[in-house]
Image (spheres, rainbow, N blue to C red):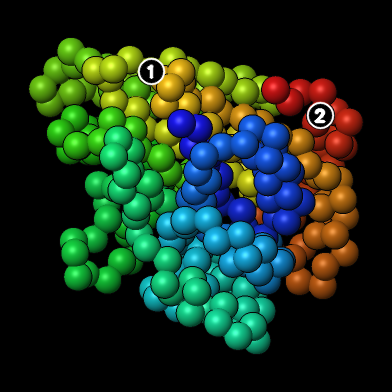
Amino acid sequence: MKIYFFGDIHGNEYALEACLQHAAQIKPDEIYCLGDLVGWLPFGDRTLARMRLLGFPTVAGNHDMMVAGLFKDHPQQLDRMQATAYNAGLLSAIPGAVEFLRSLPLFLERENFFITHNNPFLLPAQGEVPAIECFEYLTEAVLEASLSEWSNFPKQVIFSGHDHVPAIYELPAGASSPPELGEIKVHRPPAGQGLTLRLHLSSRYWVKAGSLAMNRDSVPMANSVLYDTVEETITLFRLPFPAVRLGRELQSHFFAPNLTAVRNYIGLLDEYGGDDRVRNGAK
């Protein structure tokens, strides 16, 4: 069975379309979205409309929930709050858009894998309302604090996004009890390239899928994941999309360049040298 994952779209319709075209070539049995359909880029109306039509099973991202008014952000996240406010205003004029974001589940469970936007060990208890504290990035300290629960987690594979950096974390069979941070193997794709990892039956895996926008590893490509349960492999893909076109549209937008994070992203899109150079580095 082939299962395809992507997330952290953040309004990047160009990367979303590249990802969908790639999935059409692979012909997976199932496709899941890891959340953050909106936020950051000022085009959340486009990506939300597309995803609603596609109907893929999707988990809620922190941006989705903040745009839908379910909780507030950290007060120091000024850029992110402004992007949230812009997208909230944009979507408020679209019938059913906010209600759709509010309806997204925090996680999905399947026989051998678990899907959530961020960290399953930071999710609120059943019946509790989520908060921004549920969405800490996977620093070494956060990973270390999660190791005991991860070693006892009933699913072999966790799929999540949020960090905007693609990686596969492996908790090897035979690790200490509780595990130590130094025992975790971290598999990262080379810059601009993909990575395929063959799974060990007794190991556990936490897959960070990367993102379709606002990449934090300075590689402006669309990231996606394929889980092949027959071949027992996980592949991280890097996909080209019209980066320069997106950069120009963002640069000419009346609001987006006011946000430092978006302005830096525009610079990254331009600096990477255009679609041809991106395509040459893709797997």
Residue 272: percent from the left, percent from the top? 81, 34
Helix, strand or loop under label 2: helix
Residue 235: percent from the left, percent from the top? 53, 25
Against 66, is 270 above or below? above
Residue 237 in which image quadrant? top right
Distance Cα–Cα, label 2 vs label 1: 28 Å
Residues under numbered marks 2 and 1 in contact, where contact means CB atoms less than 8 Å apart: no
Q: Would you say residue 152 is visible in this rendering?
A: yes
Amino acid carrying mark 1 in the image = Leu
Total tally of numbered discs in the picture = 2
In the displayed structure image, the side of residue 156 where residue 169 appears, left or right: right
Residue 95: percent from the left, percent from the top? 60, 85
Residue highlighted by disc 1? 199
Label whose residue precedes the other's in the sequence (2 or 1): 1
In the displayed structure image, the side of residue 107 where residue 3 appears, left or right: right
Helix, strand or loop under label 1: loop
Amino acid carrying mark 2 in the image = Arg
Residue highlighted by disc 2? 279
Q: Residue at x 42, y 72 (%)?
A: 103
Which sits in the foreground, 231 or 196?
231
Of badges 2 and 1, nearer the viewer stands 1
Which sits in the foreground, 273 or 90?
90
